[in-house]
Amino acid sequence: MQAPPQRTRIQEKNISAILDAALDVFSQSGFRGATLDQIAKAAGLSKPNLLYYFASKEAIHVALLAELLDLWLDPLRALDPEGDPVQEIVDYALRKLDMARDLPRESRLFANEIVQGAPRILDKIEGPLKELVDEKAALITAWIAENRLSKTDPYHLIFSIWATTQHYADFDVQVRGILRPKGDAHFKDAAAFLSAFYRCAISPP
């Protein structure tokens, strides 16, 4: 089988510009509200030029989501069976909070897709994501059985970490409207709160 032709530097630059522009447009307008014209304008390209690289709006969206889901799994993959259970879970929450701070567009893109029923990544949610969550839930269950964590539902613990960290990206306007922080200063306070919150919730009696 012949290998696909290697992309030129200009092609790589244009694809990167399209994906970055699309991330802005999709995270603000959602899939339904976004248009190819908006993405092309944000990327500094003509619509025909954009269509040379991606056949449709959905093709761009799928490309973004494929990259994002793999990135999204990394913090959970990093839970170390050999580590201290309480510290491992606290560190996981803090890694997720860092992502909310550093990758807010990606978080909102993912949230918009989920709200719409995940039509383009449901197979990934029911496949690789579920498999990883099942694996880490089993690890947490083992830690509980060893009395290294307090008794808790491992799945809902993971869900709660997603909720309490991704909130700072998905509801950024609300958080900033209430706290009026200087830059990202509120993330330091959030990290301190979540560290204490989860440490208290999961430390064994």
Image: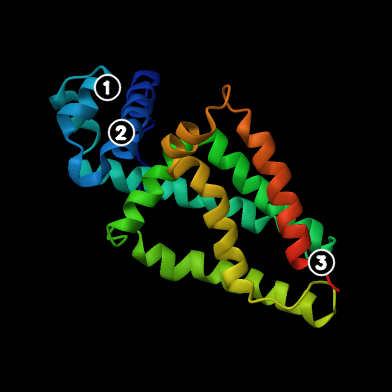
C-alpha distance separating marks 1 and 2? 8 Å
- Single out the residue that lies furthest toward the bottom: 145
Q: Position of residue 136 (x, y in %)?
A: 65, 69
Q: Nearer the viewer, residue 2 or 133?
A: 133
Q: Amino acid at mark 1?
A: Ala
Label 2: which residue? Answer: 22
Which residue is rendered at x = 78% and y = 59% of the image? 199
C-alpha distance separating marks 1 and 3? 48 Å
How crowded pointer 1 is (Cα within 10 Å; few <14, some 14-19, many 20+) is rated as some
Q: Nearer the viewer, residue 176 or 24?
A: 176
Count of numbered badges drawn on the protein: 3
How crowded pointer 2 is (Cα within 10 Å; few <14, some 14-19, many 20+) is rated as many
Q: Which badge, 1 or 2, is on the more N-terminal residue?
A: 2
Residue 4 quadrant = top left
C-alpha distance separating marks 3 and 2? 42 Å
Label 3: which residue? Answer: 203
**SS at mark 3 in the image:** loop
What is the quadrant of the C terminus in the image? bottom right
Asked if 123 appears above or below 142 in the picture, the reply is: above
Label 1: which residue? Answer: 42
**SS at mark 2 in the image:** helix
Q: Position of residue 201 (x, y in %)?
A: 73, 65
Which residue is rendered at x = 68% and y = 50% of the image? 194
Q: Position of residue 142 (x, y in %)?
A: 76, 78
**SS at mark 1 in the image:** helix
How crowded pointer 3 is (Cα within 10 Å; few <14, some 14-19, many 20+) is rated as some
